[in-house]
Every structure is written in C-alpha cells, then in structure tokens.
Image: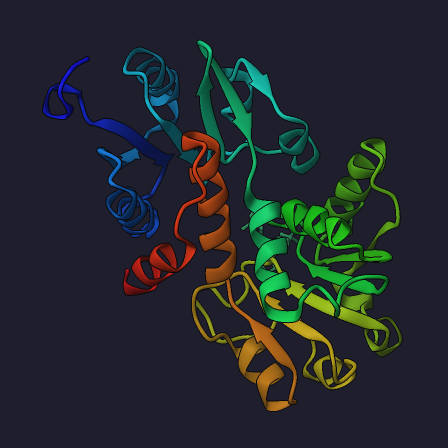
Amino acid sequence: MAAAADRPMRRAALIGNPVDHSRSPAMHNAAFAALGIDASYELWPTEPDGLPARFAEIRDDGLLGANVTVPYKLDVMPLCDRITETASRVGAVNTIIPRDGELIGDNTDAYGFATSVRETTGGLGVAARRGVVLGAGGASRAIVVALHDLGAQEIVIANRTLARAEEIARSLAQQGIVGVSAIALDDLDAGTIAATGIVVNATSVGWHDDSLPLDAGLIAALPVDALVADLTYRETALLRAAASAGLATLDGYGMLLHQGVRAFELWTGIAPPVEVMRRAMLAG
Ligand code: ATR
C-alpha cells in the first residue's frame, strides 16, 4: 500500500459562473481538515462552452465530487450518466457524484432547506399547514419540494409572472407532488396569508436591494407562529419586517450549510462535522 504522502490529494470542485464569492470551499475544506481527509475543494469558474471539458476533467481525474451552481443547474443534466429521483423532482442538479465509473446528478438543495427549517422550528410550523413560496425562478422548485417533504398540506407559489408558477405546479403534479397551486403575486391576499405556517422568499427581490417581495400589510396578516424565510445571505427588508412583527425568521445560510453537508456525505460516505462547517461558512 502506498504511504499517505504518496497518495495524490483528492479534489472536489464547484462549477458555476460567477463562483468567486462562494463559501463552499471554506466549508468543505474545514470538514476535510477536521476529518483528516487529504482533499481540497476548488472553484471552477466555467463558461457555457466549457462545461463538457469540466465533465471530462471530473471523469479523468477521479474527482471526489462536484457541486453545480448558477447558471448551470439545468445545463449539466444531460451531461450526467444518471439523474437521481431527487434531482428529477427538483428539476435541477447541484451535486455530481462519481460512482463506479458513472457521474450521477443529484440535488441536495431541497434537503438543505428542509433541514434548515427543521433546525429552526422542529418542522412544527410547516407540517399540515399552508406554505407560500414567493417566486418561480431557479430557486423556487427546490423550496416547494422541501415544503412538501416537511409535510406541508398545501403549497401556494405566488409569482409576478403567473405562467411560471403554474408551470412548476404542473410539472410537480406530474411527479406525484400534489397540493401545489399557483397565483399571481399581486393576488396574494390576507386570507391566503392568514392560514400560512411558512413564507419563503425565492424571488431575486432583496438580494441587492432593500425592497419587500410582498405587501407589508401581508406580513402583518401572518399567524404569530409563522416562519418567514429568505434565501438571501443578508438581513433583508423582509426579514427585518418579519422580526419587527414578532415572527421567527430564517436566512439562506442554513440551506447553504445543509446542502453542503449532504453533498459531502454523498461524496465521502462520511457524515461531516456540521458545526465545523457552519463556523467556516459563517467566517467566509
Ligand atoms: P431566472 O430563473 O428567471 O433566471 P431567478 O433569479 O431564478 O431568475 O428568478 C427570479 C424570480 O424573482 C422570479 O420568480 C421573478 O419573477 P418573474 O418570474 O415574474 O420574472 C422574481 N422577481 C424578480 N424581480 C421581481 C420583482 N421586482 N418583483 C417580484 N418578483 C420579482
């Protein structure tokens, strides 16, 4: 057997564009170090026409695994040899697992969000209640799947462009996820909001601005035990307004952490130290 020093360092990588602000290297490298695994997580900024070469590199170099982020979570699907049931429910791939000569496309985003909600509420606020998801873009479908997995009785997707919300509801129904309906964001009213256990902002509103993705009056109409979640990594106007109304809030760090924890487990077969990863992620 080769001595440890002779064995090549294993690699994992993040494919996306841009990737330079990602906290995934800090998080995964901290877990590798804590577990004594000789591996390194790298950033692979990639142009669209560079995706096939990246996949060739994953195969040839025997990578431990890869993550995929914006804007390639859909584009990589045909490049994988197999798509897991989870990834096909979410309709996107964020994790690539090399196994037995195959590249498996999986998705850990829904797990990441569901685990983050459970951490905050024990899942109690969501089970058997209504969930409202604002937005029907890239992030929305994983959130709907997560709310379904948490046992939400009914999920309403409210989007500025109604047709996009309807498309997600239709596609999920085909996959056996029923109880998902679509409305126009402007039609979201206090009646719908009043019976809601969780509202999740999956729009791009709040990432780089200080506006609210829904009417301030609707935040006030939420039940006192509702959870308001935003997928952003900052204290948005929505989270501030919810906290002022006395509601529990959740930002996007928990989802980022737990999607990474699950990806790490899938690549290595080892449950990583979650708090080590959380500290490294928050330190940036
Ligand atoms: P995409 O998937 O289109 O590339 P995204 O960032 O994943 O982009 O999704 C953006 C989401 O934020 C969409 O749901 C978008 O609504 P539309 O489908 O109507 O475009 C939503 N969004 C963006 N700006 C918004 C705004 N000012 N008000 C409300 N929703 C907005």
Q: Quadrant of residue 222?
A: bottom right
Q: Position of residue 201 (x, y in %)?
A: 62, 63
Judging depth in this view, the residue of 68 and 110 nearest the camera is 110
Split into 4 quadrants, where in the image is the N terminus? top left
The reply to whether residue 206 is visible in this rendering is yes
Is 252 placed left or right of 183 in the picture?
A: left
Q: Which residue does the image show at 43% across and 70% down from the upper left?
A: 234
Q: Which residue does the image show at 73% across and 76% down from the upper left?
A: 226
Q: Position of residue 224 (x, y in %)?
A: 75, 85
Q: Position of residue 248 (x, y in %)?
A: 62, 79
Q: Residue furthest front?
A: 1
The reply to whether residue 213 is visible in this rendering is no
Q: Quadrant of residue 158?
A: bottom right
Is 143 placed left or right of 20 in the picture?
A: right
Judging depth in this view, the residue of 182 and 274 nearest the camera is 274
Split into 4 quadrants, where in the image is the C terminus? bottom left
Q: Which residue does the image show at 45% across and 32% down from the upper left?
A: 269
Q: Position of residue 82 (x, y in %)?
A: 58, 16
Where in the image, quadrant-wise, is ligand 1 located? bottom right
Q: Which residue does the image show at 35% across and 39% down from the upper left?
A: 17
Is 64 placed left or right of 200 in the picture?
A: left
Vertical side of 203 occupied by 87: above or below? above
